Image (cartoon, rainbow, N blue to C red):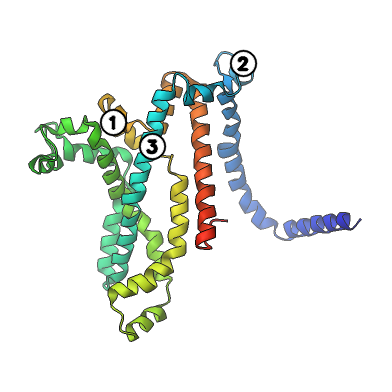
Amino acid sequence: MEKEKIKINTARQTLYKIKHNWQLYVLLLPIVLWFGIWAYKPMTGLIIAFKDYESTKGIMGSDFVGFKNFANLIVGYQSVNFWQAFRNTFIISAYGLLFGFPIPIILALFFSEINSNWFRKVTQTITYLPHFLSEVTITGIVILLVYNGASTTGVLARILISMGIADDSGMRILETPAFFRPIYIVTGIWKESGYNSIVYFAAIMGISPALYEAIRVDGGNKWQEIKYVTLPGMAPTLIIMVIMRIGKMLSVGYERVILLYNKNTYVTADVLSTYEQRIGLLNGQYSIGAASGIFNSLIGFALVIGANTISRQVSKTSLW
């Protein structure tokens, strides 16, 4: 009886809150509908990963095959290409985390040390600008820097050739598998570092000035201010961003990859998103593509859970 009374009281309280705050729920309704239509409803199509999907039969009419598509990916006829794409995705993401993650933090530290407001705004605007350019524009600029159709060799390619890092022409650089990952990572750093620094700059601005004054009174220098005040003050933000970044380790976007890679660089450039696009859409193997997507999502989910658990145990800071 007590449990039933508690349930009834809880339901009444909920209805009371909805009745007296209905305006907020009306404002929330469009967002809920958007997620329902565009995020959750399409998930019903994932069932084709467990079927031998045929477009003529439809999703429900296709034969159920269980985990056969996953077996084909992991140990079957698609395993070679799938694990190559999996490895490339993980390596590119790891390089992006290793080399790309610190750059926005360093930029935010630089911005916080600029005393002139107008100069800081100008530099921030310059670094933010590439984020608002499309991937087509960004990759077009990169390709022109490496390979100029008129002179066959771009400015960047000439620098690499003069340093002995590359040889022959700029076009050969774009067709060399070993150069794809560095080009991809550097392009991503250039495009997103300035915009990503906003979060860290906001975290720095949230640190109490009294802490800086205290360390200056104690004779601390600029490096000690950063080490003992700025970085510890940014720590919760850094941890949350690392956890979120780890969760996206297997989510390398296909746009930049498709615009930069070619058949000669598949061995290092083909990632899970391009593999799914090529197998699922171009080759018509929708079930295999869906199975690859589910496998990718499960690994990403496991990485987020693991990173969050470790962070909660070590630093007491976590997403949940």
Q: Quadrant of the N terminus?
A: bottom right
Q: Which residue is mark 2?
A: 63
Q: Image quadrant of residue 194?
A: bottom left
Quarter of the image holding residue 83?
A: top left
| Label ID, residue 261 | 1
Q: Which residue does the image show at 33% across and 45% down from the upper left? A: 95
Mark 2 neighbour class, 10 Å CA radius: few under 14, some 14 to 19, many 20 or more:
some
- Which mark is first along the chain, 1 or 2? 2
Amino acid type, callout 2: Asp
Q: Nearer the viewer, mark 2 or mark 3?
A: 3
Task: Give the camera-side residue of 151 and 210.
Answer: 210
Residue at the (36%, 49%) spot, across then down: 97
Tell me how far mark 1 sits from mark 3, CA to CA: 14 Å
The disc label shown at residue 89, or none: 3
State the SS at label 2. Answer: strand
| Real-space Cα separation, disc 2 to disc 1, in angstroms | 36 Å
Q: How far apart are the alpha carbons under marks 2 and 3?
A: 31 Å
Q: Position of residue 189 (x, y in %)?
A: 30, 49
Residue at 35%, 58% in the rendered image: 197
Residues under numbered marks 2 and 3 in contact, where contact means CB atoms less than 8 Å apart = no
- Which sits earlier in the primary sequence, circle 1 or circle 3? 3
Q: Quadrant of the C terminus?
A: bottom right
Disc 2 and disc 1 in contact, CB within 8 angstroms: no
- 232 over 271 or under it: above or below: below
In this image, 171 relative to 212: left or right?
left
Amino acid type, label 1: Tyr
What residue is at 14 percent from the left and 31 percent from the top? 149
Secondary structure beneath label 3: helix
CB of mark 1 within 8 Å of CB of mark 3? no
